[in-house]
Amino acid sequence: MKTKIFTLLLLALPFFISAQTLTIQSGATVTIAPGASMTTGEIDNQGTAASLVIQASSTEQGSLIFTQTGANPLGTVQMYIGGSGVEQGDDPLHVYHNVGSPVFSGATANDFYIGTGHDAWLFGYVPTVDIANPQTDLDIWDPVTVLGTQLTGGKGYFYTWRTNPSRDETGIFTFTGELLGKEVTQTLVFDGG
């Protein structure tokens, strides 16, 4: 019951909270439910990543907006990837989603896999422009072949799977690590002659 009252207060007073520091004491938890949102200033998570959870469902995502000048807080973010991905090429059984790691550090390629016996693959985007024709985006997608590979915060990924009635590669994926409330800078690579 206390959690429901606390959540109600967060939703009822977004402008009061937006100017404040959210302090999560060790042993306490803050959960942002699917469809709910919270805006705050700094976050001081004195607990673990499980102390701050942003949930997702098949229809909605929780939302947290904050501005951090100190150390990035730890958190857990859920992300739903549905089975209605975009068809890839001429193979209607091969679908994909463009995704990004919802945590800045701590996530690995393994976070994108459910169960065993996968028909799923992950590729990292390498922003590359042909120097001879700067308006041309070369769309280079680098395969991530080791499940323990750290994902880069702010980088785009291509998650693709072959639909298979015996396995489901969709659902709620959980990522644990540092949440980023600062600017992300991505290096642009120029290629060509």
Image (cartoon, helix red, strand yellow):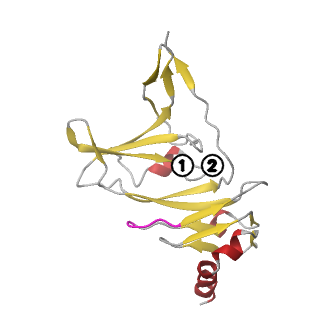
**Can I make out residue 14 in this image?**
yes
Q: Which residue is mark 2?
A: 104
Q: Nearer the viewer, residue 75 or 14?
A: 14
Extent of the magenta region: 58-62
Residue 97, horizontal then vertical, whole percent = 38, 47
Q: Horizontal placement of 58 versus 126: left or right?
A: left
Q: State which quadrant residue 178 falls in.
A: bottom right
Query: x, y percentage for residue 14?
Result: 64, 75
Numbered tag placed on residue 115 in the rendering = none
How packed mark 1 is, by other alpha carbons closer than 10 Å (few <14, some 14-19, many 20 or more), is: many
Check disc 1 and report the residue beneath it: 101
Would you say the residues marked 2 and 1 are in contact, meaning their CB atoms lie under 8 Å apart? Answer: yes
Asked where in the image residue 91 lies, by quadrant, the reply is: top left
Q: Quadrant of the N terminus?
A: bottom right
- In the rendered image, residue 60, in percent from the top left (x then y), is placed at 43, 67
**Residue 181 percent coordinates (x, y):** 67, 54
**59 displayed left or right of 151:** left
In this view, 89 is above or below 48: above
Q: Residue at x 59, y 73 (%)?
A: 31
